[in-house]
Image (spheres, helix red, strand yellow):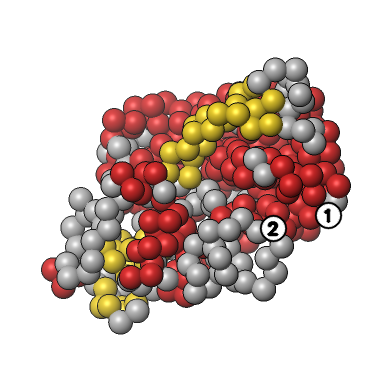
Amino acid sequence: MTSLAPDLMHLPELDFASAAYAERPFQVLAKWAQRWKIARSARGVELLDYDLCRRAIIDRRLGTGHPKLMDVLGLPEGRPLDYKRNSISFFNRGDRRRDLRRPMTKLMSEDGIAAFRSEISGTVQRVIDAVPTDRPVDLISTLCDPVPSAVYCYWIGAPFEDAEFVARTSHTVQQVHTRNPDHTPAIVAAFEALIDYADKHIAARRDNLSNDLLSDMIRAEQAGQLTEHDLRNWVIKLAEANTDNSSHQIALAVVELASRPDIWARLHADPSLIPQAVREVMRYHPRTISTSREVLEDCEIGGVPLPAGTPILANIGATHWDDRYYSEPDVFDIDRTDEPPHMNFGGGIFSCIGRFAVTAEVEDVIRLLSARHPKLQIGEVEFDHSPMFSLVTKLIAQLDN
């Protein structure tokens, strides 16, 4: 339970542990948003309004809450905690965060990812080629996990076969967001393995620069844009964040699009619709349900005074289902054109560095699947919606019938 200032205890309290939230999270969030713009929970102060969330995401008075997360987990002294302390997640707005982001923002910009698009598409195709088509199959283990981890392997010049290791360790280290110290030993072990893995591939690539992302990052280091330590931390960070988040976003897109035969048929007939269809997935069923911030200095948001140190949660899932901003938000509509953009990737200096890569991976999966398998049938699907994330825990499908 987060300790809030007494003056904040008058705010209405949200119950993310309720059965209603577990069963219908976005409908519950939308209902809360209709009643309140600001509330509180066991996590901290909860923002439920689109404009308040959008402003909070870019508000320079709010910073990252990641350091406190490490305290909650009780991460011990050692290489994993040292990595965390020096990675971008620990730095608030200012010169250090800007300097860390600048070279990576360029390398992973929309144009930067476009330069790798054919290789990303080829990697996605290789994964899809291996998925059995004659029987129901677990798409999480055969498609959703392998795609982003295989792309990461391409980025750093690692063998395609390492994708399983990358996916497994990424899923494990992302357990930091559970705030459960029971997971700490496994998180530490996974980070230790990722650190060794990054060191090995950086050393191998230094003497054999190529046209992959790691080579470009080494060139940025040689140009003085990154330190040796920063380079290593980015290689680890890309594995830490990319695979787990991308896997779930791919799964969400497959479920929401392929389970609607009329839409799937439209995508098969007209692949140009895929980018807007993926955007609607990210609005309707976002991977990121909320994003956390911490008040850096006493301030006021939405008329509520907030003392420094207060944890703030911007509930993106609530804003995406708010009928004050989206017409019929509970309707999945790939033809939306005049409504505000989704906030699945944050914004400003805290925006997701890998957003264009993730989008490319999702789009390529949908493009290849819809083209090759117009009769794809979704079978068993299970979700787990935490206050922070949408997780697809089971996805069985048959590609051909």
- Which one is in front, 273 or 122? 273
Residue furthest to the front in view is: 262
Residue named by callout 1? 272
Q: Could you classify mark 2 by the number of other residues whose Cα lies within 10 Å: few (under 14), some (14-19), or many (20 or more)?
A: some
Q: Amino acid at mark 2?
A: Ile
Q: Residue 27's quadrant in the figure?
A: bottom left
Residue 5 - label: none
Q: Residue 68: in sight, yes or no?
A: yes
Query: Depth-wise, is mark 2 or mark 1 nearer the camera?
Result: 2
Label located before the other in sequence (2 or 1): 1
Q: On screen, 69 above or below 393?
A: below
Residue 330 is situated, as x and y percent measured from the top left of the image, at 53, 58
Name the residue located 62 percent from the left edge and 45 percent from the top edge.
256
Q: Give me the disc on residue 334.
A: 2
- Asked which quadrant contains residue 105, the reply is bottom right
For the residue labelled by badge 2, is the local secondary structure a helix, a strand or a loop? Answer: loop
* Residue at the (13%, 68%) spot, across then down: 6
Of all residues, the one furthest to the bottom in this rendering is 303
